């Protein structure tokens, strides 16, 4: 169950008490990636969780690595000044942990090396004596490729190596690792509940894990990885009958045009992104998830046509009646041939399309097909409750956004497990929930996220959060020429598209929404420069 609506008498969930997760591992072993991913998942479950990073705290207090004594990162004998400085930083981190617990927090993930058994045992004893459950989480890694990628993609871009030559920064960090290896003590006893993760999910060893919440932590850790991949989100194309949940109608002519345009743009955008990282786009697979609704599944058909031809995908040609060229669009699939002026973007090595029934749009119940004015007229009491709490309110025989979030939990786990580039072609309500999970928005903000047809959302998970981009690629019904949403949305589909009516709402750029999502986190997701960030309307 995710984002639960209840709490116990203590204010904590699942009767699990308070938990301190102590990470253990040599540098560049994926501890930060694991910590941030676990924090995101537990927060989605409604558990008040925070990562306390020793490295982040030290950089805030002292600055980069060049501002600390030369023996600060070297295990073994140290000068009295360095010992006092290290104690000051560790005491400050512990104080932050206590403050979070005292403020009602339930789980703290202490992201640090904790390689000395005596040191981590002392920390664990201090918290256990106050009734805090302690779990040791060790990350082991003997895969040199994972270590090298982690150093180059995460470590040398940190403030510790700002202004350094990349190769010199890598060499310096390897020296730091070698120094730590000489004094590192792995978990080899059973004094504490413990979890060992080998090569970021390749193998997991656990000891004395008890209770529902600790078991959920194990379940989540069994499904994560740190391979680079990009997740794309796009709405399905326009259908022939837009305003009915019950009508599983096919794509309209403009919907087929949208599907073809989406295919071209995704492949082009993906190729540019991978080539910028020095990756051959033809060497990687692309996985596409859709719901079982025709309008979602058929929006993915042009990807099949691009690899197997239009007949394999059963993509129809649209015949334009004489004298009525404005009524219909051209054939949705543009064949790439000698006569075509278009240069096809590089194709993935394989495209796999999976239909998932859990990704159906939110069920409006008795409000299906009603406009907002009709809902207010016929169900005034329900309408008032909906406006006050659009996340948890459930119309008669309908789903709330909370219900939808619960339904999507298996999808979220599969999202973490998927290692290939992923395109999710879905309904607005489903994309809102999945995007809120990845970015870390609170549940109350989910109904207010604007997901406009014609925009491609690009999310790149990273060790310190996510990078988010938004690209506008299509103008058609529901979009104006300048890319702004036009006031032509179907008024009878307001329950699914609640947030897209931005009238009377102030628009907040994604930077502000991400700041809201990370008020208690030190490393929010940041959209890249030069891109147009998504707009999140807030009531």
Image (spheres, rainbow, N blue to C red):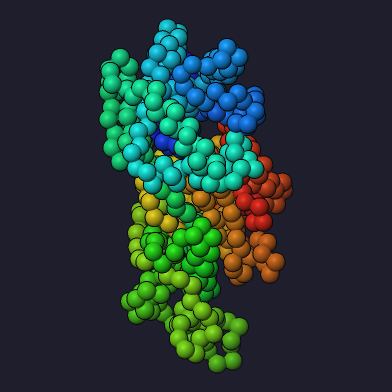
| Identity of the residue furthest to the top in this view | 129
Residue that appears at 53% across and 64% down: 272
**Circle count:** 0
Residue that appears at 49% across and 60% down: 278
Q: Nearer the viewer, residue 446 or 456?
A: 456
Q: Nearer the viewer, residue 443 or 187?
A: 187
Residue that appears at 62% across and 25% down: 68
* Residue 344 sits above or below residue 39 on the image: below
Residue that appears at 49% across and 24% down: 74
| Identity of the residue furthest to the bottom in this view | 322
Q: Quadrant of the C terminus?
A: top right
Q: Position of residue 234 (x, y in %)?
A: 51, 59
* Residue 205 sits above or below residue 228 on the image: above
Q: Nearer the viewer, residue 252 or 31?
A: 31
Specify whether 484 is left or right of 301: right
Q: Nearer the viewer, residue 173 or 489?
A: 173
Q: Position of residue 70 (x, y in %)?
A: 58, 25
Specify whether 347 is left or right of 439: left
Q: Answer whether residue 438 is visible to the viewer in this image.
A: no
Q: Quadrant of the N terminus?
A: top left
Q: Position of residue 249 (x, y in %)?
A: 43, 67
Q: Answer whether residue 472 is visible to the viewer in this image.
A: yes
Q: Position of residue 405 (x, y in %)?
A: 45, 42
């Amino acid at each position: 169950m995710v984002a639960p609506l209840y709490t116990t008498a203590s204010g904590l969930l699942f009767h699990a008490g308070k938990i301190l997760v102590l990470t253990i591992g040599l540098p560049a072993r994926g501890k930060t990636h694991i910590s941030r991913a676990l924090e995101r998942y537990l927060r989605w479950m409604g558990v008040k969780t925070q990562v306390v990073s020793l490295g982040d705290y030290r950089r805030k207090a002292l600055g980069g690595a060049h501002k600390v004594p030369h023996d600060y990162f070297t295990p073994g004998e140290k000068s009295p000044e360095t010992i006092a400085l290290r104690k000051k930083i560790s005491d400050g981190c512990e104080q932050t942990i206590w403050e979070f617990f005292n403020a009602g927090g339930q789980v703290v993930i202490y992201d640090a090396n904790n390689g000395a058994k005596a040191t981590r045992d002392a920390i664990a004893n201090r918290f256990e004596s106050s009734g805090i459950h302690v779990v040791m989480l060790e990350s082991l890694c003997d895969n040199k490729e994972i270590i090298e990628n982690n150093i180059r993609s995460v470590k040398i871009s940190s403030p510790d190596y700002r202004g350094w030559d990349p190769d010199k920064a890598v060499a310096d960090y390897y020296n730091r690792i070698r120094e730590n290896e000489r004094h590192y003590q792995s978990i080899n006893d059973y004094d504490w509940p413990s979890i060992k993760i080998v090569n970021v999910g390749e193998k997991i060893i656990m000891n004395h894990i008890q209770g529902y919440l600790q078991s959920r932590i194990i379940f989540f850790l069994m499904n994560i990885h740190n391979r680079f991949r990009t997740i794309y989100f796009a709405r399905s194309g326009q259908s022939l009958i837009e305003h009915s949940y019950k009508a599983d109608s096919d794509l309209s002519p403009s919907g087929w045009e949208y599907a073809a345009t989406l295919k071209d743009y995704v492949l082009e955008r993906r190729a540019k992104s991978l080539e910028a990282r020095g990756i051959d786009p033809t060497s990687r697979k692309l996985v596409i998830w859709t719901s079982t609704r025709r309008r979602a599944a058929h929006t993915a058909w042009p990807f099949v046509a691009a690899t197997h031809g239009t007949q394999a995908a059963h993509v129809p040609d649209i015949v334009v009646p004489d004298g009525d060229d404005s009524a219909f669009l051209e054939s949705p699939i543009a064949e790439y041939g000698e006569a075509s002026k278009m240069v096809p973007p590089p194709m993935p090595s394989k495209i796999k399309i999976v239909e998932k029934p859990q990704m159906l749009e939110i069920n409006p119940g008795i409000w299906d097909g009603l406009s907002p004015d009709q809902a207010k007229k016929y169900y005034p009491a329900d309408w008032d409750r909906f406006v006050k709490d659009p996340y948890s309110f459930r119309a008669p025989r309908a789903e709330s956004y909370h219900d939808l979030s619960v339904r999507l939990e298996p999808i979220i786990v599969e999202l973490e497990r998927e290692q290939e580039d992923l395109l999710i072609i879905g309904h607005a309500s489903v994309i809102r929930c999945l995007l809120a999970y990845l970015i870390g928005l609170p549940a109350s903000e989910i109904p207010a996220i604007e997901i406009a047809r014609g925009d491609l959302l690009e999310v790149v998970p990273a060790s310190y959060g996510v990078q988010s981009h938004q690209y506008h690629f299509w103008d058609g019904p529901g979009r104006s020429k300048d890319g702004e949403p036009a006031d032509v949305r179907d008024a009878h589909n307001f329950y699914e598209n609640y947030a897209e009516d931005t009238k009377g709402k102030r628009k907040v750029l994604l930077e502000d929404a991400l700041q809201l999502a990370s008020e208690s986190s030190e490393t929010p997701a940041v959209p890249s420069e030069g891109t147009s960030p998504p707009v999140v309307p807030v009531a």
